[in-house]
Image: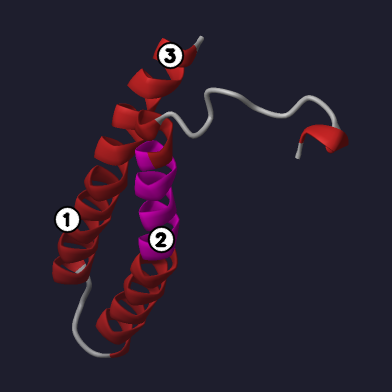
Amino acid sequence: MNSVKKILGYVWILLGPVIILFLVQQAIEKIAAASEGIARTNTTLQWSIIILIFIPICAGLVIFGYYGIKGEYDRLPERSEDL
């Protein structure tokens, strides 16, 4: 089971930046496709908010994966007294 946690750690580390790159690529496409004026401003604002919300989430994925690789989750407590 610990080997699965380490493999998933690598998956999380790779998934974080890939998600951000995908979101930025989608934002560029959608903003370029938006018509001029208010519609383009609204699209830009929406994608800016989406990207700003997902940056900390993806950073958390990378940190979670790092701890998985380092073995921090190899032994999880089963009772409150184990903490």
What residue is at 40 percent from the left and 74 percent from the top? 49
Between the C-alphas of marks 2 and 1, the distance is: 14 Å
Q: Which numbered disc, 3 or 2, marks the residue that appears first in the sequence?
A: 3
Q: Is residue 77 left or right of residue 34?
A: right
Image quarter where the C terminus lies is: top right
What residue is at 86 percent from the left and 35 percent from the top? 81
Viewer-proximal residue, 56 or 77?
77
- Dot 1 amino acid type: Gln
Decide: is 16 above or below 49. above
> Mark number for residue 4?
3
Decide: is 8 above or below 40. above
65 magenta-colored: yes
Residue hosting label 1: 25
Q: Is residue 32 left or right of residue 51?
A: left
Residue hosting label 2: 54
Dot 3 lies on which element? helix
What residue is at 16 percent from the left and 64 percent from the top? 28
Q: Position of residue 62 (x, y in %)?
A: 34, 46
Dot 2 lies on which element? helix
SS assignment for the magenta stretch, majority: helix
- Which portion, as a residue range, is magenta? 54-66
Between the C-alphas of marks 3 and 1, the distance is: 31 Å
Q: Position of residue 59 (x, y in %)?
A: 36, 56
